[in-house]
């Protein structure tokens, strides 16, 4: 695992890393706020907010110009990492409790408001960049348990960068921190002292009950990313302009959030159907929509190919099929896309989002019974990761 470099401050590097890997919509660097009648406060050095889940970072870096030796670095670690940084994490939680809602701004400049009542998982991290002479005993401290803040993950900069490069999606990063916390709870003494790649490798295998050990690094070494199968960054380009709704700004975030919640195996299912719909729209035949549901996030997806001859009906088709797929899945949420050729060798793509509690609807039941408009689906368990020795 390599370091983050030295061209900017460590905090700036951390913010840029989160922005580049985890969507500008969900990365927050402007976290200072002024409560009514008070002075300016700062929530954390960096935030990632994905739906209701929050990741709060404190960043600490050793001044390269300071005198250094193992004893000085050990004192720096105790004072700055175990002392000041963990206190700042506790302050972040206290500010959320005392001053909610707290306004923060993402890398698109859009405002969000944070309140503890609206949050699900809250992961606390201290990322630090130490001098090379930091003793091994301090480098091997992987976590801090606070009586008020709970578990705080401690990660050297190089290790955090390695985690991001291995997992690549925000959903997997949140999932890894859940898994890491479970390992710490089960095996606190074994986690201390293990290199981070061993913990990442054990996450890839997916067995928190196994004794942590360096042998799990092999899984990380063998990991196959297969990025072309699941990367949808090209699909998301200019995404906000393609939403079919007068409330486009309000619907943009729910749709992008649901996509960001998908792990790479789920994103591969999304991308496969998206490309199939686009390809089938080239022909003149009417083709049944493609669809799938992600039980983990309780969101359905439907992909509607529309030939050029029927393009004038595509918005109605999009809304009807989105609502129909949502109902058939008995899902609380559904995302629909419709695509048709635009006549210039490209495709027109429009999006729709529906979210409301599922309720029995006799009219919808009759429509689905008399003229079922979808392909049949079956439940399958997706492979979490692919490795070099697998077909």
Image (tube, helix red, strand yellow):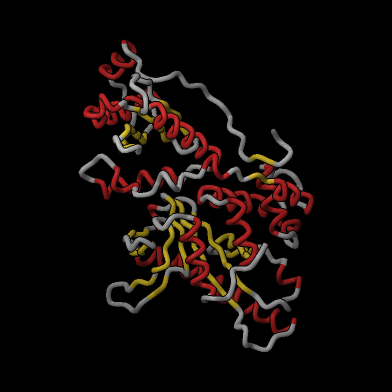
The image position of residue 294, as x and y in percent, is 47, 34
- Residue 295 seen from this side: no
- Residue at the far top in the pictured view: 370
Residue at image coords 35%, 66%: 99
> Which of the image's four quarters has the N terminus?
bottom right
Does residue 162 sit above or below 227 in this rendering? below
Image position, residue 130 (x, y; %): 65, 75
Residue 222 placement (x, y as % from top left): 72, 46
32 left or right of 21? left
- The residue shown at (57%, 67%) is 126
Residue positioned 71% across, 72% down in the render: 138
Viewer-proximal residue among 213 and 13: 13
Q: Inspect this view and state whether residue 135 appears.
A: yes
Residue 131 located left or right of residue 16: right
The tally of labels here is 0
> Residue 314, located in which quarter of the rendered image?
top left
Observer-nearest residue: 87 or 283?
283
Residue 195 at what x, y percent from top left? 73, 60
Q: Residue lying at the far front in this picture: please name it.
A: 344
Quadrant of the frame with the C terminus: top right
On screen, residue 271 above or below 153: above
């Amino acid at each position: 695992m390599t370091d983050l470099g030295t061209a900017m401050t460590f905090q700036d590097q951390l913010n840029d890393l989160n922005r580049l890997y985890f969507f500008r919509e969900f990365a927050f660097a402007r976290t200072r706020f002024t409560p009514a009648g008070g002075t300016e406060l700062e929530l954390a050095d960096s935030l990632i907010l994905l739906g209701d889940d929050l990741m709060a970072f404190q960043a600490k870096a050793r001044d390269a110009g300071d005198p250094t030796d193992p004893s000085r670095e050990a004192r720096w670690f105790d004072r700055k990492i175990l002392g000041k940084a963990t206190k700042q994490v506790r302050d972040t939680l206290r500010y959320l409790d005392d001053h909610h809602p707290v306004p923060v701004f993402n890398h698109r400049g859009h405002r969000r408001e944070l309140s503890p009542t609206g949050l699900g998982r809250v992961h606390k991290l201290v990322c630090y960049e130490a001098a090379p002479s930091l003793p091994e005993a301090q480098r091997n401290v992987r976590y801090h348990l606070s009586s008020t803040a709970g578990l705080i993950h401690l990660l050297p900069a190089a290790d955090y960068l390695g985690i991001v490069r291995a997992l690549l999606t925000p959903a997997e990063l949140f999932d890894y921190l859940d898994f890491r916390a479970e390992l710490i709870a089960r095996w606190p003494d074994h986690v201390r002292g293990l290199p981070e790649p061993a913990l990442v490798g054990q996450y890839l295998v997916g067995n928190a009950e196994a004794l942590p050990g360096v042998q799990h690094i092999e899984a990380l070494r063998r990991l196959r990313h297969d990025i072309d199968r699941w990367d949808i960054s090209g699909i998301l380009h200019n995404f906000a302009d393609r939403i079919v709704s007068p409330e486009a700004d309000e619907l943009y975030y729910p749709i992008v959030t649901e996509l960001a919640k998908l792990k790479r195996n789920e994103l591969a299912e999304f991308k496969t159907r998206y490309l199939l719909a686009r390809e089938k729209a080239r022909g003149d035949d009417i083709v049944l929509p493609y669809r799938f549901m992600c039980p983990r996030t309780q969101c359905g997806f439907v992909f509607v190919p529309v030939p050029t001859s029927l393009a004038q009906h595509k918005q109605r088709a999009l809304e009807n099929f989105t609502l129909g797929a949502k109902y058939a899945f008995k899902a609380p949420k559904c995302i629909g896309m419709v695509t048709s050729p635009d006549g210039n060798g490209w495709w027109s793509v429009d999006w729709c989002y529906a979210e409301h509690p599922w309720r029995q609807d006799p009219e919808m039941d009759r429509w689905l019974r008399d003229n079922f408009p979808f392909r049949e689906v079956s439940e399958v368990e997706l492979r979490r990761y692919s490795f070099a020795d697998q077909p």
